[in-house]
Image (spheres, rainbow, N blue to C red):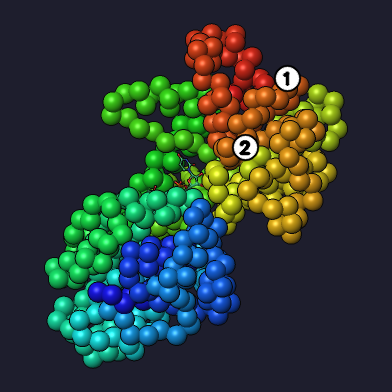
Amino acid sequence: MKKISVLGLGYIGLPTSILAAQSGYKVLGFDVDQDKVEKINNGEPTILEPEVIQRLYQVLESKNFSASVDLHPAECFLIAVPTPFEETKTKKEDKKADLTYVFSAAEKVATVLFPGNLVILESTVPVGTTAKLAKILEEKSGLKVGIDFFVAYCPERVLPGRIFQELIINDRVIGGLCQRSAELAREFYSKFVKGHLTLADDKTAEMVKLVENSSRDVQIAFANQLDAMCQKIGINPYRVIELANKHPRVNILNPGCGVGGHCIAVDPWFLIETFPKDSELLKTTRKINDNKPNQVIKDVLKKIDAIKENGISKPKLLVLGLTFKADVDDMRESPALKIAQELKKKKSLLELAVCEPNVISDSLREMGFANIKGLFEGVAWADLVLILVKHKEFYSIKELDLKDKDIVDYCGLLHELDSSEFASYLNFDLTLRDAACSRSSGRAG
Ligand code: SAJ
């Protein structure tokens, strides 16, 4: 295999194209977006990710990679297009995968499919989609899968912010429609993946991807419920988790302000769609995690009321972090953003400022955040500090004078800063613990 075509030049397709090109393949990246294609060919990456600029420049220079809005024949086609929810479905329980992009990519590939070709699907999809994709390829090309051409499913597992590293080192599962399909896909990936490549069937690989993200969702929901329980009795949930995790077979995740991004909050729905009767736990999980931002808003408004009772007529609220998780610039589906936007509407109750070091101020202003502050200036200004995302920049909050500030921490930053011997002692000393709770709504530890 020498000539590869990658369909969809987004967060997965572009870095995968670049790595494949760096490992010696001739890669043609295909995308329907002319503007994106032009930018990429000019060396301007359309995703924000460490290493992408240098690597893109290198593969354009070596002429191993170029992007196009036309698809040409190749030996291997890799499909990495988005699979959002169907737009028409409005009811929460009705969320279904929209496979339009996957199937139109298959139709496109069928027009240039030749005997001996391999087609790999990487997009996250409901179980059974790879087989449907193979059917479309057969119908539109007149060729036979497993005889004339080969089809495999190989889900990605990368974390934004570490995409290149993880594309190289992570183990992967390859689900072939037949043994030969899986083996050919392994041959393709083995040129640039150092992690172990395990072969399976297509349905198993599809299930593995959905189960990975769903299990994380369930675990976060458990942490979020545990958080609610601890708040009710005034103990520190992060401390409880830290201590419980000292058990050799316990590994509880962290409570947060909600679950954002395009994966964890989406993929469980693809299982619910296929297995409506066997997914009670997943439905409950989605409900708990989706409701967490509302819970945060309620808590903050209570805190605002308490501050008002102490004589400040319009408390100043500083929100730390707006992205969907720490140290990324991605605000799509961000619970922190949702919380800040809702609180911004409460103009008669509070004055709001935001601090988000990963996003340029112009973008924040476009979203309607007029009051943008740096960490030091913002903390000095605020009566109440709401920590929603654990960005590395926020760790320097420890250098600031917080004694007259109210702080509500929804990501465990203060607990991390405080996990000294003294903080551990707090949990055994009720007087000290209560003092800590009154300063930080029981969250600082
Ligand atoms: N979160 C918590 N508590 C935690 C961990 C995460 O509240 O203990 C929240 C985050 O703040 C964020 C959301 O969950 O809002 C999701 O963040 P994440 O870091 O768990 O995951 P993603 O969406 O960035 O990436 C996930 C990863 N999947 C798993 O860890 C099982 C990644 O490996 C996948 O490649 C990616 O989904 C994907 O593309 O499917």
Callout 1 crowding tier (Cα within 10 Å): few <14, some 14–19, many ≥20 = few
Q: Is residue 368 above or below residue 232?
A: below
Return the mark for residue 393: 2
- Name the quadrant containing residue 108: bottom left
Residue type at tag 1: Lys
Where is residue 376 drawn, in percent x and y?
74, 33
Relative to residue 336, is residue 351 drawn left or right?
A: right
Position of the N terminus by quadrant: bottom left
Q: Is residue 252 above or below residue 221?
A: above
- According to the picture, the residue beneath numbered tag 1 turns out to be 403
Where is residue 137 drawn, in percent x and y?
28, 83
- Identify the secondary structure beneath mark 2: helix
Q: Residue at x 62, y 37 (%)?
A: 393
Callout 2 crowding tier (Cα within 10 Å): few <14, some 14–19, many ≥20 = few
Relative to residue 175, is residue 83 drawn left or right?
A: right
* Mark 1 lies within 8 Å of ligand 1 (Cβ measured): no
